[in-house]
Amino acid sequence: MALKVEYKTLTVTDQNNNYVTLSGAPVDGTVAMDVISGTAQAYNTDFGVADTTVKWTAGYNLYNNGSIDSTGLFAGDEIRIMYDKTV
């Protein structure tokens, strides 16, 4: 396995879709995500992964430990996604 780190600056499309696509498929259970200038996020609580897609729930305030409100992630926000992938 190899550690992969991806930085994504969210677009309006990402914001509206509530997901981003990774360049590779992560090994199940190895994904960590945090918001730059924010906090670490909990796998399967704040975000989920399906194949190469990292998705989050609209209305989650990822800046406040995943509490539900109207903040969410917006275009221009930067996230870091770290995962193991098979080589």
Image (cartoon, rainbow, N blue to C red):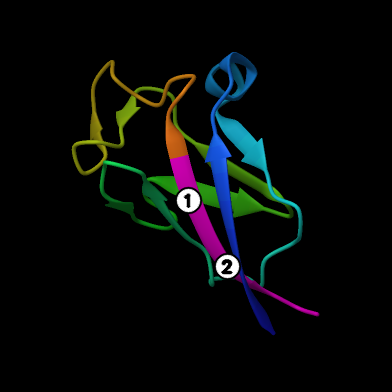
Q: Percent position (x, y) of residue 29? A: 54, 71
Magenta stretch, main secondary structure class: strand
User: Residue at horizontal 37%, vertical 45%?
Assistant: 46
Q: Which quadrant of the rendered structure holds the C terminus?
A: bottom right
Mark 2 crowd level (few <14, some 14–19, many ≥20, 10 Å Cα): many
Using the image, tell me which numbered label, if any, was put on residue 26. Answer: none
Q: Is 86 contained in the magenta span?
A: yes
Residue at 73%, 55% (x, y): give it.
Answer: 51
Graded by Cα atoms within 10 Å as few (under 14), some (14 to 19) or many (20 or more), the crowding at tag 1 reads some
Nearer to us: label 2 or label 1: 1
The quadrant holding residue 27 is bottom right
Q: Amino acid at mark 1?
A: Arg
Mark number, residue 83:
2
Left/right of residue 69 with respect to residue 72 in the rendered view: left
Q: Pinpoint residue 9: horizontal percent, then vertical percent.
A: 53, 33
Point out the image quarter for the N terminus.
bottom right
Instruction: Report the side of 48 relative to 72 (left or right).
Output: right
Residue 67, compared with residue 75, is above or below; it is below
Per the image, label 2 sits on a secondary structure element best described as: strand
- Which x, y percent locates residue 17? 61, 22
Q: Residue at x 67, y 66 (%)?
A: 26
Residues at marks 2 and 1, CA–CA distance in whole angstroms: 10 Å
- Residue type at mark 2 is Tyr
Q: Which residue is mark 1?
A: 80
Q: Residue at x 52, y 50 (%)?
A: 48
Start and end of the magenta stretch? 79-87
Quarter location, residue 32:
bottom left
Question: Residue 47 placed where, x, y %?
Answer: 46, 46
The image quadrant that residue 19 belongs to is: top right
Above or below, 66 relative to 14: below
Q: What kind of element bears circle 1?
A: strand
